[in-house]
Amino acid sequence: MQLNPSELTPVINRLKRAQGQLAAVTRMLEEGRDCKDVVTQLAAVSKALDRAGFAVIATGLEQCIVQQDATMDKKELEKLFLSLA
């Protein structure tokens, strides 16, 4: 199933933000910053990536329903969803 890039603009933006956050975490580690601050930022990156993944899956599910795409069956969609859990 091909995803429509125009529908994924918010996901792309979220991933770019997460990329910046991850770079900041790396800098924090290199600078010897406080453990609590590093873990807090790392958790934010993780949450952003999870949300991006869920948004991609939700978009794919919507396209399957609207377009009645037979290339993905229920088990494949479930496997994708659970891969983020």
Image (cartoon, rainbow, N blue to C red):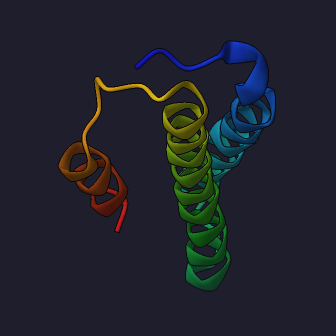
**Could you tell me which residue is drawn at 64 percent across and 56 percent down?**
48
Q: Quadrant of the C terminus?
A: bottom left
**Could you tell me which residue is drawn at 57 percent across and 71 percent down?**
43
Q: Is residue 50 left or right of residue 18?
A: left
**Could you tell me which residue is drawn at 40 percent across and 20 percent down?**
1
Front in this rendered view, residue 64 or 23 = 64
Farthest bottom residue in view: 36
Residue 70, percent from left and from top: 32, 26
Residue 74, percent from left and from top: 26, 50
Up-down relation of residue 78 to residue 58 (above or below): below
Q: Is residue 66 left or right of residue 16?
A: left
Residue 81 falls in image quadrant:
bottom left
**Could you tell me which residue is drawn at 57 percent across and 31 percent down?**
63
Front in this rendered view, residue 57 or 25 = 57
State the count of labels. Answer: 0
Residue 34 falls in image quadrant:
bottom right
Residue 44, percent from left and from top: 66, 66
Up-down relation of residue 25 to residue 38 (above or below): above
Up-down relation of residue 35 to residue 46 (above or below): below
Residue 58, percent from left and from top: 57, 48
